[in-house]
Amino acid sequence: MQLYKNNRQRYMAGLVYIFLIYSMHYLIFTEHFLIGKYKVSPIMNRIILFVFAVLIYLVGSVHLRKLQGTWMLYLWHFIYISLLAILLVIIIVKLICIAISYEIRPIDIFPYIQVILISPLLYLMLGLLNRLLVKAQQF
């Protein structure tokens, strides 16, 4: 049984799932909508962000695999693996720099990269790029 009639419906389903996961993270952990006054420690917050990033990576991989443009899946993997590698390097540098004074430590871009990973913008960008390339091939 085919659930989606065309590639656009497959893409939109993936976008909706990613948007729902992102919204759930934002409402629960960023705005404290459901957890109320309870504060999440910074370490636990990074673990939660990593789990949500992996969830969105899996949803994007599953839905992009079903589309005809395999280049989108390769680009999706490349972007996610590259950003996760950058996060790993930042963690290693921070562990090395713990003994160094605060003024010399590198700028903390860790949360910004993780927010890029969990937002639906990467998936949306790939869909818009695919649509642009399909229209360019038609002319």
Image: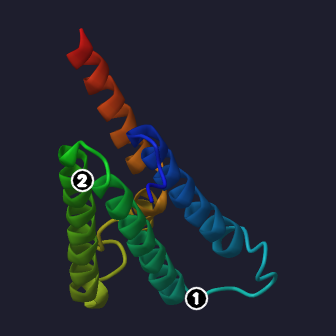
Of badges 1 and 2, the one in the foreground is 2
Name above or below for residue 134 compared with residue 13.
above
Q: Please, which residue is most extreme toward the front here?
A: 1
- Which kind of residue does numbered mark 1 sit on? Ser
* Residue contact between numbered discs 1 and 2, judged by CB atoms under 8 Å: no
- Which kind of residue does numbered mark 2 sit on? Leu
> Which class describes the residues within 10 Å of circle 2: few (<14), some (14-19), or many (20+)?
many
The residue identified by callout 2 is 73
Considering only order in the chain, which callout, 2 or 1, is on the residue closer to the N terminus? 1
In the picture, which quadrant includes the N terminus? bottom left
Say left or right for 45 vs 35. Answer: left
Q: Nearer the viewer, residue 98 or 77?
A: 77
The residue identified by callout 1 is 41
Q: Position of residue 41 (x, y in %)?
A: 58, 88
Residue at horizontal 48%, vertical 88%?
43
Say left or right for 13 vs 39. Answer: left
Residue at horizontal 18%, vertical 45%?
71
> How far apart are the alpha carbons under marks 1 and 2?
34 Å
Q: Nearer the viewer, residue 34 or 127?
A: 127
> Residue 65 bears which disc, if any?
none
Q: Position of residue 14 (x, y in %)?
A: 47, 54
Asked whether residue 70 is in view, the answer is yes
